[in-house]
């Protein structure tokens, strides 16, 4: 049974920090690129950050670059998102995603999301 379970969300003041975690099970975590997406009310889901399967490369949306850091621990089957200098516009549900394409077969899994609310 494939599972991605996010945790660490909550309410924080502007300028504060949160660390999100996503615990994976039921698939070969080390073979998948991992990413964080977010979706605010009335907006489309957007990419926040991504990391390659071995953790050798990362990518961030421009608005998050310099404030957010994605990392992974393949031994723990966990991906993290460290969020600093949070702003009210960061308020959203944050989702963990696992993705792989191998020999024409596509695999794509999503977590249930965790709410992040940043007060002004």
Image (cartoon, grey):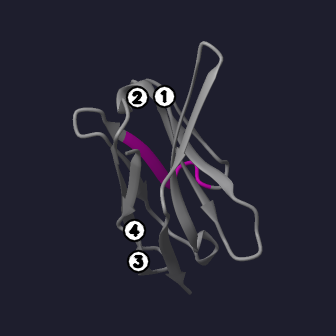
Please state the horizontal and vertical placement of residue 114, each as a whole percent of the image.
46, 68
Q: Nearer the viewer, residue 114 or 84?
A: 114
Q: Nearer the viewer, residue 76 or 58?
A: 76
Judge left or right: residue 44 versus residue 66.
right
Cα distance between the residues tagged 1 and 2: 5 Å
Instruction: Return the residue at label 4.
Output: 17
Residue at 36% from the left image edge and 64% from the top image edge: 7
Per the rendering, the mark at residue 52 is: 1
Residue at the extreme bottom of the image, as rendered = 120
Cα distance between the residues tagged 3 and 1: 27 Å
Q: Residues within 10 Å of mark 3 (few under 14, many from 20)?
A: some
Q: Are marks 1 and 4 in contact (CB under 8 Å)?
A: no
Q: Earlier in the sequence, mark 4 or mark 2?
A: 4
- Count of marks placed on residues: 4
Cα distance between the residues tagged 4 and 3: 10 Å
Please state the horizontal and vertical placement of residue 95, each as a whole percent of the image.
53, 58
Q: Earlier in the sequence, mark 4 or mark 3?
A: 3
Q: Earlier in the sequence, mark 2 or mark 3?
A: 3
Q: Earlier in the sequence, mark 1 or mark 4?
A: 4
Magenta stretch, residue numbers: 64-71
Give the position of the N terminus as an image quadrant.
top left
Q: Are marks 1 and 2 in contact (CB under 8 Å)?
A: yes
Residue at the extreme front of the image, as rendered = 1
Instruction: Return the residue at label 3.
Output: 10
User: Residue 89 falls in which quadrant of the image?
Assistant: bottom right
Cα distance between the residues tagged 2 and 3: 26 Å
Per the rendering, the mark at residue 55 is: 2
Q: Residues within 10 Å of mark 2 (few under 14, many from 20)?
A: some
User: Residue 73 falls in which quadrant of the image?
Assistant: top left
Of helix, strand and loop, which one carries label 1?
A: loop
């Amino acid at each position: 049974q494939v599972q991605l379970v996010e945790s660490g969300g909550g309410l924080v003041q502007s300028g504060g920090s949160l660390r999100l975690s996503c615990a994976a099970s039921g698939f070969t975590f080390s073979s998948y690129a991992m990413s964080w997406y977010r979706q605010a009310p009335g907006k489309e889901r957007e990419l926040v950050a991504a990391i390659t399967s071995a953790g050798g490369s990362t990518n961030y949306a421009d608005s998050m670059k310099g404030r957010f850091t994605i990392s992974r621990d393949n031994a723990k089957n966990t991906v993290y998102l460290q969020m600093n200098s949070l702003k009210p516009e960061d308020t959203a549900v944050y989702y963990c995603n696992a993705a792989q394409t191998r020999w024409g077969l596509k695999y794509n899994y999503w977590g249930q999301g965790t709410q992040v609310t940043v007060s002004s």
